[in-house]
Image: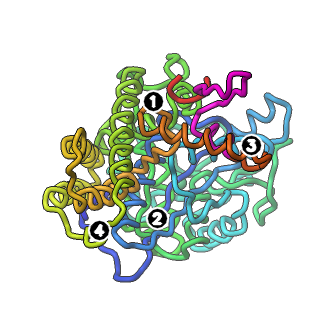
Amino acid sequence: MVLYNTLTKRKESLKIETGAPIKMYQCGPTVYNFIHIGNARPLCVFDSLRRYLMYLGHDVIFAKNFTDIDDKILDKANDLGVAWQAIAEDYIKEYYIDARGLGELPPTHEPRATGHIPGMLKIVKKLLKNNFAYTCDGSVYMRAKKVPDYGRLSGKILEDLQAGARVAINENKEDELDFVLWKAAKPGEPYWESEWGNGRPGWHIECTAMIDNIFGDTIDIHCGGQDLIFPHHENELAQYVAYCNKPLARYWIHNGFVTVDSEKMAKSVGNFFTVRQVADEFGYLPIRLMSLQAHYRSPINYSIDVMKQNLSALQRLSNCVCLLTDTRNKIADTEGAEQPCEELETLKNKFLQELDDDFNTAGALGVLFDLVKQINLRLTNTQSYDINYVVAATKIMQDFLFILGLDLSNFSNQSACEDEQVQELVRQREIARASLNFQEADRIRDNLQNMGICLEDTQDGVKIKRDPGGVLS
Ligand SMILES: [Zn+2]
């Protein structure tokens, strides 16, 4: 597999030591608000990359942090008159709802910045000792230009950086490019004690320390949005090199931007959408599909039309999966149906080729929908299906959907298959009620509710209603 490495500015083959786990880190959210649809993209893309590496047989250790102390969190807490911890706690909960909704597999590690302060202090202390850092008015700054190759990751030339740098008021730095490792506490702000005075960590040192604490060595893949390359990732890298003279990561992978109606998303323009807003209207799956619809380094565009098109694409996919499941269920004996099927193998190889070439999920999605076409052609309106084909197609479909993270089980749809399933569940619930097993009856009703189906018990029997909060209403 080749991946484009931002550090070397070229596609490189991903080399992993045999049997060694893949160490992967993604910069997570600053928890002061709901995540927006721009944030959904790295979440879905890198979750799929992780799934693909797992599919290839690798053990992936995936860490993604929460920045749970930050000016934005403090500002929001002040505005609302609540504790800053409560803001962080609330938005971590909201984040989980969106992340699971978008189909992200739970990360192996989910460190919170405030849980790793001692590790940050340890690194800052060493940077001061080896002269890469200096104290100034109770804060500690990094001497950026002292780090060999500073600017290499972002591809920025130091002179350009210097010209673009702006010094905030009250910052007595030695050089414009120096950045803060430890911020002196202002009156009334939360703080941790340190040798240099009370304060809190700078944003960049958080990730470096969490990576160091969790992995203890150079990691394989560091990923995040393009907007993080400079200064955040450049500075994470500089800190680690200065701390232990080793690279922070072997491959730096960055995703492109999300625009809204072809414009840059901004609160001031009024085209700012949270994942929750969009999911409330369309469900999470069309957002996941959108996030994978272009090559991850290209920009993608969000619009209502894209969501509608994706809903109908998902409907087609869901119908095909139902057709496949129905056909598969009709087969009592699958013994001997283990032969590879040539036309399916061709599609599978194409799918893997797309992903092996710099993780082209757009190409892989194209192959998925070719598979849908092929299955529909082979299995619609026919009684004479090839058992071997059905078994192999089921397996390949499962693999494709797993890698792309498209979990159709919660996708409400009007397909015949689902209606059959609903009718059967309703029938089972009636049986349970008739035998006074209300616990079982309630369990079935809850299951149906999860599928977006509401039951109403009337004098004329049970009425089935689509849940108004469901994705297709
Ligand atoms: Zn980071």
Identify which residue is drawn at 57% across, 73% down: 130
Q: Earlier in the sequence, mark 1 or mark 3?
A: 1
Q: In the rendering, at what x and y percent does residue 155 appear?
A: 32, 51
In this rendering, is residue 138 above or below 372?
below
On the image, numbered disc 1 is attached to which residue? 414
Q: Earlier in the sequence, mark 2 or mark 3?
A: 2
Q: Is residue 57 left or right of residue 279?
A: left
Q: In the rendering, at what x and y percent does residue 138 appear?
A: 74, 54
On the image, numbered disc 2 is attached to which residue? 24
SS for dot 1: loop
Distance CA(mark 1)–CA(mark 4): 43 Å
Identify which residue is drawn at 45% across, 44% down: 408
Distance CA(mark 3)–CA(mark 4): 60 Å
On the image, numbered disc 4 is attached to which residue? 14
Q: Which residues are magenta?
A: 444-466
Q: Is residue 4 left or right of residue 74?
A: left
Q: Residues within 10 Å of mark 1 (few under 14, many from 20)?
A: few
Query: Closer to us: mark 2 or mark 1?
Result: 1
Residue type for callout 2: Met
Q: Nearer the viewer, residue 12 or 334?
A: 334
Q: Earlier in the sequence, mark 3 or mark 4?
A: 4
Q: Earlier in the sequence, mark 4 or mark 2?
A: 4
**Where is the N terminus found, in terms of image quarters?**
bottom left
SS for dot 2: strand
